[in-house]
Amino acid sequence: MRVLIVESNASLRWLWKRHLQRRGFAVELAGSQEEAAGAISDREHDVIVLDAVLEDGSALAVADYASYRRPDARVIFVTSSSFFSDGSIFALAANACAVLPCGTSPDDLASVVEHYGARG
């Protein structure tokens, strides 16, 4: 399974990458909207783990671009904010399949990625 992690926090994205790789996933990293758009343009991903509040760019723009370029990719949003706790992200991003707090354990994140990636 191919996974793209789009996360502003470098330490967090590397932590998630290592856990996902241990499960046998091919993982690519991006830290900004621009990097994510390049990765989405050039390669297919089964799942995109996307920081809902990117420091450099817009997560919703990334999700929208993914829905256009890679319509089969599932997007799992992660956030440190309670802003999307009402489920509004599902109305804003048609390809959103889950919203998790960024404090979710890496093993639990890997299980969610595995679950939604297998459904694609």
Image: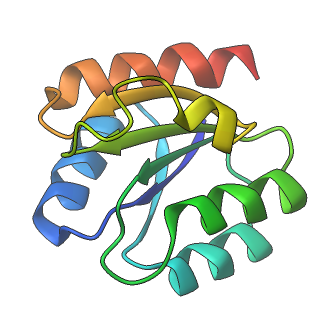
Residue 23 visible in the picture: no
Left or right: 76, with 106 as reference point? right
Q: Quadrant of residue 7?
A: bottom left
Residue depicted at 43% across the width and 33% down the height:
24
Q: Is residue 90 left or right of residue 81?
A: right
Q: Which of the two residues, 77 or 31, is positioned nearer the viewer here?
A: 77
Instruction: Count up the numbered dots.
Output: 0
Pick whichever, 53 or 46, lies toward us.
53
Q: Where is residue 119 in the image (x, y as percent from the top left)?
A: 71, 14
Residue 31, picture quadrant: bottom left
Q: Residue 91: x and y, percent?
A: 67, 33
**Measured along the vertical axis of the image, is residue 110 above or below residue 49?**
above
Q: In this view, does 61 lie above or below 111?
A: below
In this rendering, position of residue 72 left or right of residue 90:
right
Compared with 56, 93 (above or below) is above
Which quarter of the image is occupied by the N terminus?
top right
Name the residue at 23% across, 36% down.
Answer: 82
Relative depth, front residue between 2 and 24: 2
Residue 6, percent across and down?
A: 43, 62
Image spot of residue 32 (x, y percent): 43, 79
Q: Which residue is drawn at 62% across and 30% down?
A: 90
Residue found 62% across the figure and 65% down from its top: 62
